[in-house]
Amino acid sequence: MRLSARSDYGVRAIIDLAERTGQGPVPSEAIARRQGISDTFLDQVLTLLRRAGLVHSTRGPRGGHVLAMAPERVTMRAIIEAVEGDAFLPPVPDGRGRDGPPVDGASVPATVRVQQEVWEEVRSAVHRILDATTVADLLERQRELSAPSRYYI
């Protein structure tokens, strides 16, 4: 399983906006510069985030983007699904060969059913983790990572 650049950039853009909550609209050029993302690609990602209701955008010289809700209410799953759709995880095997239905039209073989069970568990675990991880959680982790080390003697 791989995280696409679109998902990575979507999460990074949302975190960037969350850091600036209450400061007014943030221009996409500023986000792109801070995050090292192409302006053009970021604009595509921000459009998807806006369509999903996670970001509000304003045009014009004082325009930009703001989070549409509090960071505590935005989950990683919502961000990833906004930019990837709901099929961001690999599909569960369905027992078909490369060219169609299962061999001789039989029911799904046990070798496929056992894989289906495992992949459903994986999907469920990923959804559970992404649903439980909010942008506020990510901001807190970021602050902890950025805090200067303290040494006590």
Image (cartoon, rainbow, N blue to C red):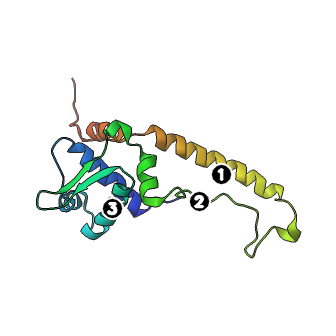
The residue sitting at 71% across, 53% down in the picture is 116
Tell me the crowding category of disc 1: few under 14, some 14 to 19, or many 20 or more residues within 10 angstroms, Cα based.
some
65 shown above or below 136: below
| Disc 3 residue type (three-letter) | Thr
3 or 2: tag closer to the N-terminus: 3
Please state which amino acid type lies under the numbered disc 2. Pro
Indicate the amino acid at tag 1: Trp
Q: Residue at x 76, y 67 (%)?
A: 96
Q: Name the residue carrying label 3.
A: 47
Q: Nearer the viewer, residue 2 or 152?
A: 2
Task: Quickly name the residue at label 1.
Answer: 119
Nearer the observer: mark 3 or 2; the answer is 3
Q: Say what secondary structure mark 2 lies in.
A: loop
Badge number at residue 90: 2
Give percent across and percent down for residue 81. 46, 54
State left or right for residue 129 relative to residue 51: right
Mark 3, secondary structure of its residue: helix
Regarding residue 136, the answer to whether it shows in the image is no
- Residue 139 appears anywhere in the view: yes
